[in-house]
Amino acid sequence: MHLGHIRNNLLGYSVAEILKASGKKVYKTQIINDRGIHICKSMLAWQKFGKDETPENSGLKGDKLVGNYYVAFDKAYKAEISRMVSEGKVKEVAEKEAPILLEAQAMLRKWEAGDEEVVGLWKTMNSWVYKGFDETYKNLGVDFDQLYFESDTYLLGKDVVADGLEKGVFYKKEDGSVWIDLTDEGLDEKIVLRSDGTAVYMTQDIGTAIQRVTDYPDINGMVYTVGNEQDYHFKVLFLILKKLGFSWAESLHHLSYGMVDLPSGKMKSREGTVVDADDLMDDMTQTAATISQELGKLEDYSDSEKQELYRMIGLGALKYYILKVDPKKRILFNPEESVDFQGNTGPFIQYTYARIQSILRKAVRLDLNLTGLENGMKLHPKEKELIKQIQLFPETIQLAAENLSPALIANYTYDLVKEFNSFYQQVSILGEPNEQKKILRVQLSKKVGEIIQSAFLLLGIQVPERM
RNA sequence: GGUGGCAUAGCUCAGCUGGAUAGAGCACCUGCCUUCUAAGCAGGCGGUCCUAGGUUCGAAUCCUAGUGCCAUCACCA
């Protein structure tokens, strides 16, 4: 997994939490594309170049190991192409006829035919990948209520395509491939089944969508969190489902988000030019540790307490950095300039939360009665501003839910926290001589702390008692 | 070429359904820790809101055209 996948996971997780907070029931679903030509490419490369390498005997994380073979395939494929071109082939022809590609395609046909050896290898390599992914998801703090494997749903997709063919929604070309004509809708013709009868991406997506609605008849809609490079694909998918006569096709949403790019351009798994998710999380934790040690406020913490805190802060910085940006905009990530820990950042907000907890701990010791408060108090301007900002939280949740945008939560929280810090600096809270004012200020602080915690929960970020 | 998205300070980004001198952070400069945590606060510097038209009492925001960047239009996923 790389940084692009992190954005996908964080967005999906956060939007699910936001929708829940807005009053909806949500099933967090992950669709795993565990079949198809891309998997066969890794399998083939492993067979050819793998020398029986396993996660156990190499010490590599399973998903990385398999990813390496995906890269190895591409390298070998490109080498074959350039060799064929030097032998006089036209590049476009070479791209289609490279032996290793033909082998991968043959493997896919074998897989769909249920060939034992191919299916066996497929199961083994996928189990490696899942084990690796599980570890990363756990570190990242995302989880799912339901998993769909496209190897389980593509057959349903093929059946539906056959039905649609009878109904006249699709049509067959002479070579046997099946298509849908969307030119009336201003789109193109789109393939839904290959001429060799194997399923394409669209086939399995049709099947998966129908399976999901069958499994959860109570849902009113589905949100697909997928990058904007697939805008067209989902437009077509939704249209196909509508043409097939599914009424629920009207309530499908594509939460389309921008790519995470590097200064050098796009991240490409195939070419290995990616920011690795696991490495990045480790780096962030390490940076948090360095900063925290320089400040030296936690000498009395145990090593394990410190480690947990560093992780919380490092991950908070990373998640906030990703989620504060409007989903539809692309993110430019420069590995040379590390993610900030000051200003409009996760750690800044976590820090404010920790400060508030410090006040509340002291307030408990002072045995303040936090309930009895008189009406008609004259408010300090900073208190007024703070109250205004506090009141905006519920509507911000609704707005974020409507727009499927965690960025609105992040930016709201930042505004609130900025306001609180200004308040904190200008007025004395526990040092206020007037008891009524003191109680009000402690209550306001408590409320702000609660909102920070709730808001960050919506972003999947934890908050510390101290930092 | 067709379609879609994006374009706001040197950099990274806010700016909700149109409303007053366009806001943050980073960077740079100046102050503030014997007082609730300085990962902070206060202030300074910095903008042709891509361009040109249009709608409107009023446009960063809406419309049209153009420019630039990105994506997509595959028997890839």
Image: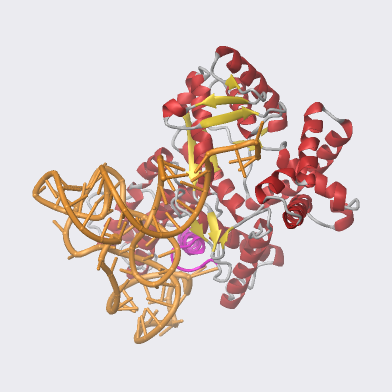
Q: Quadrant of the C terminus of chain A?
A: bottom right
Is A339 on the left-hand or right-hand side of A428? Answer: right
Establish if A60 lies above or below B18. below
Image quadrant in which you'd find residue A184? top left
Magenta highlight on residue A346: yes
The location of residue A27, given as percent across then percent down, is 57, 32
The location of residue A7, given as percent across then percent down, is 56, 51
Q: Residue furthest front?
A: A88
Residue at 48%, 59% (x, y): give it.
A353
The figure's colour scheme reads secondary structure
Is A439 on the left-hand or right-hand side of A238? Answer: left
Which residue is more in the foreground, A297 or A137?
A137
Most prominent secondary structure in the magenta stretch?
A: helix
Q: Residue furthest top?
A: A167
Q: Is residue A98 visible?
A: yes
Which residue is more in the foreground, A420 or A248?
A248
Establish if A303 lies above or below A234. below
Is A367 on the left-hand or right-hand side of A46? Answer: left
Which residue is more in the foreground, A385 or A284?
A284
Which residue is more in the foreground, A183 or B22?
A183
Q: Is residue A219 visible?
A: no
Residue extent of the magenta highlight: A339-367
Residue at 51%, 67% (x, y): give it.
A340
Magenta highlight on residue A200: no
